Image (cartoon, rainbow, N blue to C red):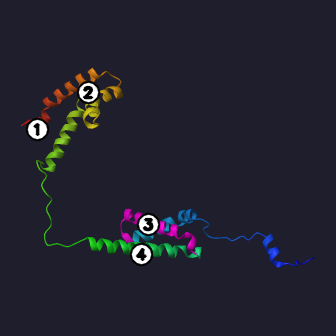
Amino acid sequence: MTTPVCTSASNAAAPVTQTLPYPSFSSYMRARQPVLLRTARSLTGNPSDAEDLLQTALTKTYVAWERIEDHRALDGYVRRALLNTRTSQWRKRKVDEFACDELPEPEPVPGGDDPAEQQALRDAMWRAITRLPARQRAMVVLRYYEDLSEVQTAEVLGVSVGTVKSAVSRALGKLREDPELGFVRS
């Protein structure tokens, strides 16, 4: 048996294998995301805020990935990032919110009706449109809900522009005569 003369040369010949529990950020994230999301939910109390918080903390972790020496302590690093980020959000929000004695009333919209009446009108109009024949309904929806021109509507439906004009005119006449829309005319 021969012994190597230079120990550093024999070590260089043998590949050094370092086994990290998470060789890449993406594998760490995939493995630990459910656990970290539960932690974020406990900090926020809201699932969507928790997802945003976790995403921010993981972004901070990704930026610092090369500087983190002990990858076995990644959960602690991310939890600290979660807590620090949540604290920063809480502080910012606290500064932006002011208590007042009176609730501010929204400015009235000029010419604006009651929102409930506007919704009732939209519902009545939609019910009236659904009672139109399918072809007329399609043309009215494309012209007035999708805001297409007569030419574009004709192209979409594969008909002439004159057909669109006459069908929309008949449909609008039926809508004017619809008894459910009578309260609008009065």
Locate residue 113 relative to residue 145 in the image: left or right: left
Whichever of labels 1 and 3 marks the residue nearer the N terminus, that label is 3
What span is colored magenta in the figure?
43-68
Query: For the residue labelled by badge 4, is the local secondary structure a helix, a strand or a loop?
Result: helix
Whichever of labels 4 and 1 marks the residue nearer the N terminus, that label is 4
> Quick one: quadrant of the N terminus?
bottom right
Magenta stretch: residue 52 in it?
Answer: yes
Amino acid beneath label 1: Val
Q: How far across and how far down the image is residue 68, in percent?
A: 56, 74
Q: Which of these two is toward me, 181 or 28?
A: 28
Disc 1 target residue: 184
Say above or below: 111 vs 77.
Answer: above
Query: For the residue labelled by badge 3, is the local secondary structure a helix, a strand or a loop?
Result: helix
Q: Which mark is residue 56?
A: 3
Disc 4 target residue: 84
Q: How far across and how far down the image is residue 117, in percent?
A: 13, 46
* Inter-mark Cα distance, 2 to 1: 21 Å
Whichever of labels 2 and 1 marks the residue nearer the N terminus, that label is 2
* Inter-mark Cα distance, 4 to 1: 56 Å
* Inter-mark Cα distance, 1 to 3: 51 Å
Whichever of labels 2 and 4 marks the residue nearer the N terminus, that label is 4
Mark 2 Cα-neighbour bin, 10 Å: few <14, some 14–19, many ≥20: many
Q: Which mark is residue 136?
A: 2
* Inter-mark Cα distance, 2 to 4: 59 Å
> Quick one: quadrant of the C terminus?
top left
Amino acid beneath label 3: Thr
The main secondary structure of the magenta stretch is: helix
